[in-house]
Image (cartoon, grey):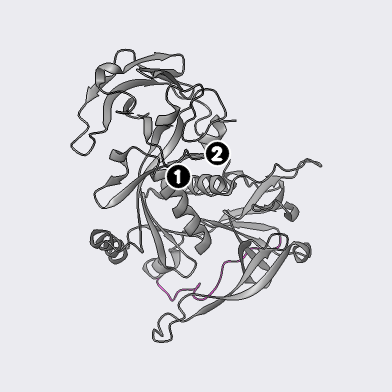
Amino acid sequence: MSALEMPAKTHGVGVFLELRKRLQSGLLIVGKDVARSPADVVVTGGESSLHIQTPRGELSLSLPAGVTFEQGSCIPTPAGESCGEELHFRLRINVTRSSDEEASDSVMETLRAKETYCFYCQGCMTRLLEDRVFKRVLPLPNGNWNAIVDDWCCHPDPFANRKLLPRAEDCLLGDTFLLVARDGSCEQTVSEEVSPVGSEDSQDPKKPCRRVALISCKSCSSVLGEAVAPETLKLYITQVVVEPAVGDRKTETSLNRSLFVERTIAARLLGLSSSLSTFHFSVQTPDGKAFLLLWLLNSDSITVSVPETSVGGERSISSPALHSPSPRAARALKLLYTTCSHTGVEQRDIVTSWEVNAIGHPVVLPLKVCEELLQVIDDSNATLPASMRCMRSYEYNLIPTPAVCRWHT
């Protein structure tokens, strides 16, 4: 997925570049509306840049620090029968490690004990919790820890039907949420409403309707999370912004919602994949219903996409709509995805297989956020070259890692 604004969907992809850092190789795709034959494309490299000469003119792509093109390595490669409107090239790159590439501004990486933080509503940037100092910042057990307790304990589960809740000065970190203690200031900034969650079908007694206390921002009514206990708030990381409290510094205006969801989910997928050594994720709603299946292929891609209408123009703008004269390549996670509501036979077989074999680490998000994430992914998928939009029964996508934003500041 691209990191900022999307190019218009009505135009085809003019130039698409994907570099693999570990393999030190790359794929360049040029639309035939830009160049009719491989002989029309000349690729050269500069310092942290790639220059592509086509009949429409020269396009310069900025590369991240430490990534350079290996001169003379770009060669044509077959594009396949389904890619009659594209020219494909393979190339080599040289990569030196950058100290900035592992940096992350994820909430999960930011929170530290004995530091002061303020919590803001992501939708309107209203301050929700003010000057919170946590004596302990602790990770919660893995999402399905309770299911394997019996395999590890020689006595009955001591944690059965008991919730892990924070103390007054604790912050507990789940996969996609934070648990914090409620205090008096919350009454001025958040509202609470009991709402049904889950199946309302009375014919299925195994799936009773569950009622939860939803927490919303009083200023903009955005749902922030749940009140899991009278004195405990569960705040989803896609709904809040957490920043260190530094004097009277004013917070920045709210990020574009799609960008924020994209960045936040990318950070969690990358973090969970690294910590749990998994690459299958099941995006679920709070009632446990699978919404979206994600298959993470790799995390070392560097990509940039330029619309056909921007190639050879006075000012080229890449798919992330970067704020610079030349498009810039950015780190991305490469993944396959399919929706659980898909009606296709092959897609339904995939969903059934994942469910039966318990494939996919659960990533729980509010239903509205699941829908937002799917929309962002679908929009991004539409900006890829036609040959990269599907792979067998999955759809294909590139989602930016947190470092993308750091490179663009």
Q: Residue at x 39, y 14 (%)?
A: 45
Left or right for 213, reference 197 = right
| Quarter of the rendering containing residue 147 | bottom left
Task: Examine the rendering and report whether any part of residue 103 can be seen.
Answer: no
* Quadrant of the rendering where the C terminus is positioned: top right
Three-letter amino acid code at disc 1? Leu
389 within the magenta span: no
Q: Residue at x 69, y 59 (%)?
A: 220
Closer to the camera in the image, 85 or 135: 85
The residue that mark 2 highlights is: 104
164 within the magenta span: yes
Closer to the chain start, of discs 2 and 1, is: 2
Give how far across and how far down residue 250 sits, in percent: 77, 42
Give how far across and how far down residue 373 sits, in percent: 47, 53
| Quarter of the rendering containing residue 246 | top right
Q: Is residue 308 above or below residue 92?
A: below
The residue that mark 1 highlights is: 270
Closer to the camera in the image, 290 or 386: 386
Give how far across and how far down residue 23 sits, in percent: 31, 28
Q: Residue at x 65, y 64 (%)?
A: 233
Left or right for 48, reference 360 = right
Kindly state the secondary structure of the residue where label 2 is placed: loop
Three-letter amino acid code at disc 2? Ser
Left or right for 6, reference 40 = right
Magenta segment: 154-168
Give how far across and how far down residue 317 sits, in percent: 49, 29
